[in-house]
Amino acid sequence: MPGAADDKYRNGKGCKKIDQATLNSILEKNSQRFKLGKVADYIPELGKANAQSIALSVVNNDGTLVSAGDIHQKFTIQSISKIIALMIAVQESGEKAVFEKMGYFGTDKPFNHFGNLETMGKPLNPMMNAGAILTTALIKGNAEEPFAKILKMIRFITNNEQIDYSHAVYNSERETGHRNRGMFYIMRNNGLIDGEGKKSSIITLNNVPSKSQWKILPK
């Protein structure tokens, strides 16, 4: 059962402020955990990442930013951008309109699983690849306008106009994105995505350029 301490935490009260020494200590204690896993290589370009790179950033309740580690190392945010695409789609069309075409459901399936596309016809949720492809397609605009909207939102949220997408990762994803294209065509067949026009062509042929190739650059 949650107690008073939990309520204080949720309300942002009574939380310990993270200082530089604390963050440095946390990073030091966890710096070797990369040995427990492996760098993702299902997209060839991602396999080139340095597994030992690690960075932490915390924004305290008073707005102060504390960072430690390889904070100047560029990295792709990958599926974090799904949240941004969802924000824009809901902002433009409303929550009801967006979730009439997909579910809110949790799942134990991998992020790139087809889920229930072939049975129920809709993505399980917007955080799986199928849902993210649909969310991106729901953003209003033709050609590269949805892409530009997502990039603008990311730059606004991070207050960093230098953020851009990685051409190398984009090309690598485009060359290996056959599974995502399959999801696109199922949803197109189910009437969830309009298959006509430049916008849908870009989403299909370029493996959703506005979904996952963002590159964070230092200020």
Image: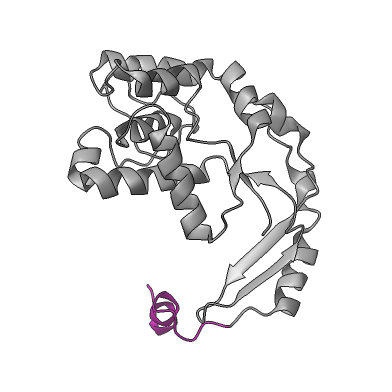
> Relative to 183, is 40 on the left or the right?
right
Residue drawn at x 70%, y 25% is: 44
> Depth check: 3 or 31 in front?
31
Q: Residue 157, how many percent across, how many down?
A: 47, 59
Q: Is residue 2 magenta?
A: yes
Image location of residue 15, percent across then percent down: 52, 82
In the rendered image, which quarter contains the N terminus? bottom left
Residue extent of the magenta highlight: 1-16
Classify 153 as above or below 177.
Answer: below
Q: Where residue 126 appears, x then y in whole percent? A: 37, 39
The quarter of the picture where the C terminus appears is bottom right
For image coordinates 56% across by 40% down, the residue present is: 78
Give the image location of residue 13, x and y in percent: 44, 84
Q: For residue 20: magenta?
A: no
Q: Is residue 173 left or right of residue 70?
A: left
Q: Is residue 25 visible?
A: yes
The residue positioned 77% from the left and 72% from the top of the image is: 25
